[in-house]
Amino acid sequence: MNEAAALRERYLANAAATAETLLRRLALKTAGFSGADIERLVREARAMARREQRPLSWTDLERLLEAGRPKITDGLRRRAAIHEAGHAIVGHLLGIGRIRSVGIAVTSNEAGHVWSEETTADEQVEPRLMARLAVLLAGRAAERVILGTVSAGAGGDHDSDLAQATKLAADIETVLGLARTRPLLHRRIEPFMLLGGQAKGLVRRIDRRLRRAERQACRIVRENRDAVIDLAARLLEVEVLEGEDLHRLLPEREGRGGSVP
């Protein structure tokens, strides 16, 4: 992101949209790029603009990025938009930070993002941690409720939603002192340890937490289905939403939610 920020200052001064929005779009479209890849992209875009005797613009970068990535189906773009809209709506309604930006840019490495900002120090109590689990699983919940299926992208690698949720659920049970079973102790669990026979009870408890959180996320998506679909539709049009354009699409919330029944 530091390299992208530097590029914003150097090369995107003449862009029509805000610099911050362009930065987020560039970050999404260059997910997985190295610093050298980004510098090469900008050099090629500058050369293109120079040949046409005009200043460099965001369109030059976008044209090169689009030319260099495989064509993505409309179905996959819509799934990504619904997935990210689910994260945003559930996170907003459960009061997990202030949603600052939502975006999609489907590539082989990255489907999209929801960026939120913690406005206050939150209590690390079990109900709030369970709410965080619901937000992590809200993308797959939106896919399930609206599309009827869940994609493998909601699981996937060690940075996936499901991987992060599994780690948090395991931490609740093993290192945060919030488990409802004895003994009370701190025990760091590595993933391979969950495969042993002695860990069956722990695996069941982690699974129960994940399923409770996913049910909560599904319920919120069902209750706010139109809001999720409207936000997803707008994302398909503009790819990145933030500021007032984003917040007028978020439903009103009553108080601060957080408990997961």
Image (spheres, helix red, strand yellow):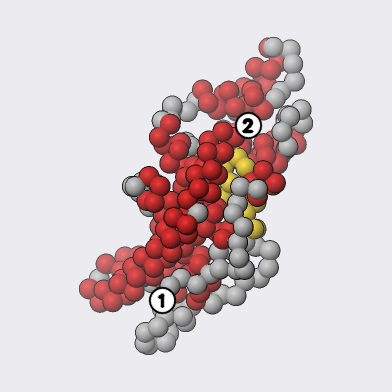
Percent x, y for residue 92?
Answer: 58, 58
Work out whether residue 129 can be spotted.
Answer: no
Above-or-below relation of 25 to 132: above
Secondary structure category for the residue under label 2: helix
| Label 1, label 2: how far apart the Cα atoms are | 45 Å
Placement of the N terminus among the 4 image quadrants: top right
User: Circles 1 and 2: CB distance less than 8 Å?
Assistant: no
Residue at horizontal 34%, vertical 74%?
205
**Residue that numbered label 1 is attached to:** 173
Q: Which mark is residue 127?
A: none
Q: Residue at x 62, y 42 (%)?
A: 241
Residue type, mark 2 in image: Glu
Q: What residue is disc 2 on?
A: 39
Query: Regarding mark 1 in the picture, which secondary structure is present there?
Result: helix
Within 10 Å of disc 2 (Cα), the crowding (few <14, some 14-19, many 20+) is some
User: 202 and 123: which one is in front?
Assistant: 123
- Looking at the image, is mark 1 or mark 2 nearer the viewer? 1
Q: Can you give x and y, in whole percent of width and height, for residue 130 in the image?
A: 47, 70
Image quadrant assignment for residue 61: top right
Q: Is residue 211 above or below residue 111?
A: below
* Point 46% across, 36% down: residue: 77
- Residue found farthest to the left: 197
Q: Going from the N terminus, do you reach mark 1 or mark 2 first? A: 2
Q: Give the left or right position of residue 70, taking residue 203 as reference.
A: right
Amino acid type, residue under disc 1 in the picture: Glu
Nearer-the-camera pick, 123 or 233: 233
Locate the C terminus by quadrant.
bottom left
Residue 174 spot, x, y in % from top left:
41, 77
